[in-house]
Amino acid sequence: MNLNRRHFLFLLGATAAGLAVENYAFAQTPLDPQLISQADPQPIGTAVLPPLPYDYNALEPYIDEETMRFHHDKHHAAYVRNLNAALDKYPKLKTKSIESLLRNLDRIPSDIRTTVRNNGGGHVNHSMFWEIMKPNGGGEPTGAIAESISNSFGNFSTFKENFNKAGGGRFGSGWVMLVLDRQDDDDDDKNNRKLKIITTPNQDTPLMTGDYPIMGNDVWEHAYYLSYRNRRGEYLEKWWNVVNWDEINKRYAQAIAVNNDDDDDDDD
C-alpha cells in the first residue's frame, strides 16, 4: 500500500468518525411504508442500515471491495446513527416516514433540521444506490423505463451521455439523479410525466423538491477514489456495467403510482 492510499484510507476513517457527531454539517430507510424491505422489521420512522444485496466484492472490477466496505459500513451506517439520534429528541417524528420528513423539512424542529436533511437524505440516497446496482448488470434498459427514457431524451445513448455529463459537472460532493417530475394538479394524464436529470449537493434528495428519484449515482469522492482517484468521468462511465435495470423499472413503477400529495398535513 503506497502512502497516498494509506493517507486516503485514514481520511475515509476520519470522515466516518466525524459523521458520528450529530450536527455534522454535510452528513437513507426506504421511501414509503410500501417500499420497506421485507427484512426490515423496524417501525416507520426508524432508520435501519440495510444489508448489501450482494457481496462486498460482487461489483468488481467496477467498484472495489474496499470502497464498498467503507461506503456501506462506515458512511451509510453513520447517516443512520445520526438520523436516529436526532429523531430520539422528538419521538413523535418517528411515526412519520423518512420520505415525509424530507418532503416537509420546514416542519422539522430547527435544532435537528440540518441533521435530518443531511443524514436522512444520505440514508435514502444510499438505500436506493445499493438496490439499483447488481453483479453482471448493465446493458441497455428494457420495459417501461426504456420507453420513458426514449420519450424523454430521444434514446438511451443521449440519456447516458447527458447523465454522465451532469455527474461530471457536479461541483464538489453530491449526486446525479434521474427523477420523475412531480404531478401537476391540473394534469389528468398520470402517465405523461417526463423524466429529467438533476444533480444535488451533498446528501440532498430530490424528495425535498417534490421530484421522485428513479436512479442515481453517488459522485462523492469516497464512492470512487480508491480505484479511480480523481478520474470521476471514468468512474461514471464504468458504473453503467453494474446498473440494475430490473430494480430501476420497479422504482419507475412506484414513481408512477406514488401519491405526491402530502400525507402529513396534521400540525405537530
Image (cartoon, rainbow, N blue to C red):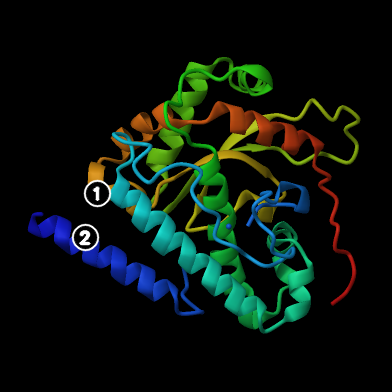
Q: Residue at x 66, y 56 (%)?
A: 40
Against 60, residue 222 (above or below) is below
Nearest to the observer: residue 186 or residue 40: 40
Determine the image quadrant of residue 44. bottom right
Q: Residue 251: x percent and y percent?
A: 67, 36
Element at label 2: helix
Q: Earlier in the sequence, mark 1 or mark 2?
A: 2
Question: Could you tell me the amino acid type at mark 2?
Answer: Phe
Label 1 Cα neighbours within 10 Å, binned few <14 / some 14-19 / many ≥20: some
The residue where tag 1 is placed is 226
Label 2 Cα neighbours within 10 Å, binned few <14 / some 14-19 / many ≥20: some
Instruction: Decide if residue 161 is on the left or right side of residue 184.
Output: left
Q: Residue at x 84, y 56 (%)?
A: 262
Quarter of the image with the C terminus in it: bottom right
Nearest to the observer: residue 28 or residue 206: 28
Q: Residue 156: x percent and y percent?
A: 52, 18
Numbered-mark total: 2
Quarter of the image with the N terminus in it: bottom left
Q: Residue at x 50, y 18 (%)?
A: 140
Element at label 1: helix
Q: Residue 177: x percent and y percent?
A: 54, 41
Residue 127 in view of the camera: yes
Question: Could you tell me the amino acid type at mark 1?
Answer: Leu
Q: Are marks 1 and 2 in contact (CB under 8 Å)?
A: yes
Against 74, residue 111 (above or below) is below
